[in-house]
Amino acid sequence: MAVYAYKALERKSGKTIRGVVDAESPVLARRKLREQNLYPTWLQEQTAGAGASKAAKGPRSAGFGRISQRDIALMTRQLAVLLKAGMPLVQALDALMEQTSRVRLRTIIFDVRDKVNSGRGLGDALAEHPKVFSALYTNMVRAGETSGALEQVLIRLADIMERQARLRAQILSALAYPAFMALFAVAIIVFMMTVIIPRITRLFERQGQDLPAITKAVINTSYVIGHYWFVIAGAVFGVYMLWRLWTRTPRGRRRWDAIRLKMPLYGTLYLKTISARFARTLGTMLQSGLTMLPALDVVFTVIDNKIILDNLEKLKTDVRRGRDLAHPLKECGLFPPMMIHMIELGQRSGELESMLIQVADTMDEDVRLTIDALVALLEPVIIIVMGLFVGTLVLSILLPIFKMSTQIGK
């Protein structure tokens, strides 16, 4: 039986309805919709695996957009509640299909339900949609199925995803105002250099007098921006593309990852973010019932820095030989000392899992507070830079005018 994404008109209200329906053929799908007092205006079959991408190419609407982390978190929590209430997994997935408003997500749930109904595990079925469900997500679900605690694992997953989405939203909200200020400042600068300065330049040229150095510099800069902006834009784009190509090579990627770790301020925040991700993923996997080595395998999938991954390979080798977690982490010299000390404490007290989660919470909060402080500092910096630029422009205009008035006075 196939699944079809549709767009239809409701008979009574005339509203546009979007969703998915399962049927043996398009004719039967349209008949099934008419029996529900819906008149289809668009219908397209969604195949397993490719359904999500095809659905995304349907009519442009919110229901066909990308699947956000909040959508996955909500779906995960709803599934946990249904399973905790005693509903069988297949029926719970059916209920999720009816509750979600996103056609793309509904199509994926339909595909997962079919695979589960045919005997596949939930984690394996979810793993066939890697762009939607991460390796951490699918491995935690597999661990929950193995341990018989799927509901608890899903609730924990929903908590993690909601926390990450909330942290990302807080950071973006904090950066929104200074980003707007920076764009506004750039727009004003470009307007003055391409519109105002050329007009004033023509006035000075008619006078034929010698101009101060600062005025000449501003006029020359305005000329370059006004006449060669496409060269500047092309050069910036070319440098960006060369950087992208370079970072896609193994050597370039390793070099760039090393540079990121050594950047002033950014490197510290970047390392704290990776450390928090490492600690949260490892702690969550251990809480879900995985042993240390399989849990470290999952951690590797969420770390995107080659330098740190190389050190984690050494860490895994040491753990396989019987060493504890804290000493290899300390020897690699990358992770923050506070994280090492808390892991040592967790190993001694037998509460390593909860201590790892606590480390992740602490570092996430530290990153958020640091970004808030930087944003608070960035706003006056933008204002000062803008003031200096405007002051330079005003000075470059007033100096020749003052010189002209002096000559007239003589």
Image: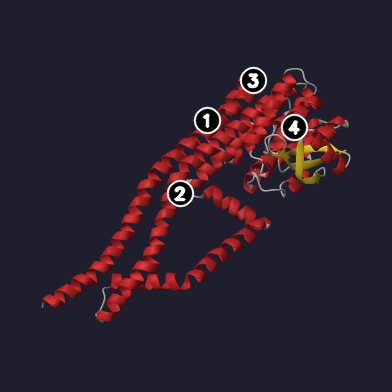
Earlier along the polypeptide chain: callout 4 or callout 2? Answer: 4
At label 2, which amino acid type do we have? Answer: Ala
Above or below, 25 relative to 196? above
Above or below, 376 relative to 340? below
Could you tell me how far apart the alpha carbons at marks 3 and 1 are, in whole angstroms?
20 Å
Residue plotted at (74% across, 28% down): 291
Could you tell me how far apart the alpha carbons at marks 2 and 3 are, in whole angstroms?
46 Å
Residue plotted at (51% across, 71% down): 231
Q: Residues within 10 Å of mark 4 (few under 14, many from 20)?
A: many
Give the camera-side residue of 206 and 215. 206
List the residue tagged with mark 2.
179
Give the camera-side residue of 57 and 27. 27
List the residue tagged with mark 4.
97
Give the camera-side residue of 42 and 142. 42
List the residue tagged with mark 1.
362
Pointers 3 and 1 in contact (C-beta within 8 Å): no
Earlier along the polypeptide chain: callout 3 or callout 4? Answer: 4
- Secondary structure of the residue carrying tag 2 is helix
Q: Residue furthest top?
A: 86
Could you tell me how far apart the alpha carbons at marks 4 and 1 are, in whole angstroms?
37 Å
Image quadrant holding the N terminus, namely: top right
Could you tell me how far apart the alpha carbons at marks 4 and 2 are, in whole angstroms?
39 Å
In the figure, residue 285 lies in which quadrant? top right
